[in-house]
Amino acid sequence: MPPHGRSFRADDRAIEGLPIRLVIALVVGVASLGVMMNMLAGVQGLTVEELDARPDPEVVGPGEQRIELTVVDTAGRPVSNATVVVTGGTATLDGVTTATTDGNGSATLSVAPGLGPNQQQGTLEVHIKPPAGSQYADERGNTDILVVTG
């Protein structure tokens, strides 16, 4: 017999703290699972390699120009079948110019950049669309092409 002369069957206080403890354990467990899933997603994200473009020449004048762009991965290896897109930044460009890299990671583009009145320099922006189904990405900015007068 319990000390107060009552049996445990009649004691309705036996589970007073149990529901709140279960809720706390559930919340902590869900939060921990969320953190672990985030860590796993981050590990998978590490396998993606960033691409960069290396324009040649990097500095051009206004008017018709031929520019060779080489697309490389983080180790400096050329990447084939990437689409290179050149657009006007602070320099003007009529439309958008695109090309696809060859087996050596190179693409040749013809552009005709221009500068505004009293503008001494400007830039052309380079964007890369990675090959379909690859582990590459173009998240960060690429090397811009500088357009200068004179």
Image: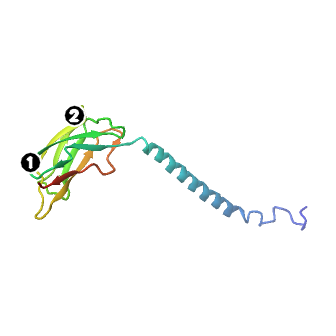
Displayed quadrant of residue 107 = top left
Q: Quadrant of the C terminus?
A: bottom left
Q: Residues within 10 Å of mark 1 (few under 14, many from 20)?
A: few
| Residue sitting at x 74%, y 63% | 15
For this orientation, the residue located farthest to the top is 103
Left or right, 97 with respect to 136, comes to left
Can residue 106 be spotted in the picture?
yes
State the image coordinates of residue 65 (x, y, percent, origin top left). Answer: 11, 46
The answer to which of marks 2 and 1 sits earlier in the sequence is 1
CB under 8 Å between discs 2 and 1:
no
- The crowd level at tag 2 (other Cα within 10 Å; few <14, some 14-19, many 20+) is some
Residue 75 appears at what percent x and percent y? 36, 37
Label 1 element class = loop
- Please identify the residue farthest to the front as the structure is shown: 150
Please, what is the three-letter code of the amino acid marked with disc 1?
A: Glu
- Tally the numbered discs: 2
Most extreme residue toward the left is 63
Circle 1 sits on which residue?
64
The residue at which mark 2 appears reads as 102
Residue 87 horizontal side relative to residue 117, left or right? right
Q: Residue 56: horizontal and vertical position, in percent?
A: 20, 42
Given residues 96 and 41, the one toward you in this image is: 96
Q: Residue shown at 56%/51% (left/top)?
A: 33
Question: Residue 112, labelled with which disc?
Answer: none
Q: Is residue 131 visible?
A: no
Q: Give the structural element (helix, strand or loop) at label 2.
A: loop
Residue 37: image x %, image y %? 51, 49
User: At 33% from the left edge and 51% from the top edge, which residue is drawn?
Assistant: 140
* Label 2 – label 1 distance at C-alpha: 23 Å
Asked whether 78 or 44 is in front, the reply is: 78
Q: How is the image coloured?
A: rainbow
Q: Amino acid at mark 2?
A: Asp
